[in-house]
Image (cartoon, rainbow, N blue to C red):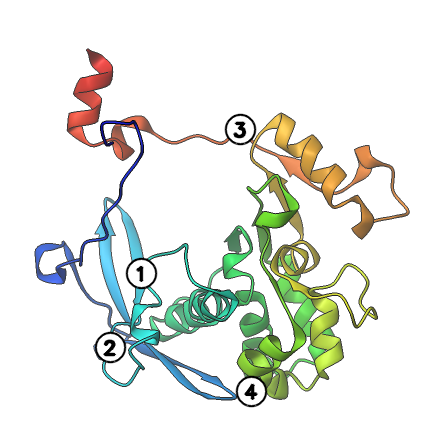
Amino acid sequence: LDENGWQEEEYLDTKVENLPMEPARGPGGKPISVEIETRTGTLLAKVWLMQVGRVRLYLLDCDVPGNSPEDRELTSRLYGGDNRTRIRQELVAGVGGVRALKAAGIDPGVYHLNEGHSGFATLEAIRVRMKDDGMSFDDALREVAQRTVFTTHTPVPAGHDRFDAALIEEHLGPLRDELGISNEQLMGLGRVEPNNSHEPFCMTVLGLKLSRRANAVSNLHGHITRRMWAHLWPWRVEEEIPIGHITNGVHIQSWLAWQMQQLYDR
């Protein structure tokens, strides 16, 4: 904080060699990387593994040779940039995340989408079911939805990512081809009104449509969220909108730096 009380921030480069992580490896011992095709080129991401207690944390890193200078910055910070940056980040998180887990030999029983940023994971999971199990698109969609839960945090409409049809086609066109659906069918998955060609693709709508259960992060937020998305279920009264809530929280000793713990104890 400066002398006037304003927050100032600085983004430092992470030194991988100083962190307790290593390249993630597949069942054969080979380091994992993922490729994501778009209409305008291929996005690359290296996968790192960090052991956090008993939890394996997989991290995606776009700062690799083969990516453009702009794409190498995609995983350097979460918020910032225009819609094109956002959709590329979310393509890496969603599609890249599912591909990283598959390369690591992991077949999740449940996908938990924490906010809409990772929503494209559902589309990649559908593609995997179609390819590996010979399912139709509709059958794969139903199965993936049964294995997906969705958490939304954002209480204002402006905070939910929306992309126009051109951006969706540029970045999801190759995946859509593999799904065997039209651009309008794909756009419909992210629209409140699937046939409204003027409505953009909303990541939260995708998450709500392709999950078996959705939740907000407090009692009050649950009421706000059900009211905000009631038009997805116009035949239901607000109390019956299928979005529940949990009480959000963290384990303080796990998340606070020791200096901050000492400050709060004082």
Q: Nearer the viewer, residue 210 or 110?
A: 210
Q: Quadrant of residue 73?
A: bottom left
Q: Residue at x 20, y 32 (%)?
A: 257
Q: Is residue 116 left or right of residue 202?
A: left
- Viewer-side residue, 169 vs 28: 169
Q: CA distance from mark 1 to mark 3?
A: 26 Å
Residue 247 is tagged as 3
Residue marked by disc 1: 58
In this view, the mark in front (2 or 1): 2
Q: Secondary structure at mark 1?
A: strand
Secondary element type, mark 4: helix
The residue indicated by pointer 2 is: 64
- Residue at x 24% of width, y 61% of height: 49
Q: Amino acid at mark 2?
A: Val
Query: From the viewer's perspective, is the residue at label 2 or at label 3 nearer?
Result: 2
Instruction: Judge the density around disc 2: few (<14), some (14-19), many (≥20) Cα neighbours within 10 Å.
Output: some
Identity, as a three-letter code, of the amino acid under mark 4: Pro
Residue position marked by numbered label 4 in the rendering: 174
Residue 43 in sight in this render: yes
* Disc 3/disc 4 C-alpha distance (Å): 39 Å
Within-10-Å neighbours for mark 4: few <14, some 14–19, many 20+: some
Comparing labels 4 and 1, the label whose residue is closer to the camera: 4
Tell me residue 103's x, y (percent). 36, 75
What amino acid is labelled 1 in the image? Tyr
Asked which secondary structure carries label 3, the reply is loop
Is the residue 193 above or below the residue 241 in the image? Answer: below
Q: Does the residue at mark 3 contact the one at mark 4 (Cβ under 8 Å)?
A: no
Q: CA distance from mark 2 to mark 3?
A: 39 Å
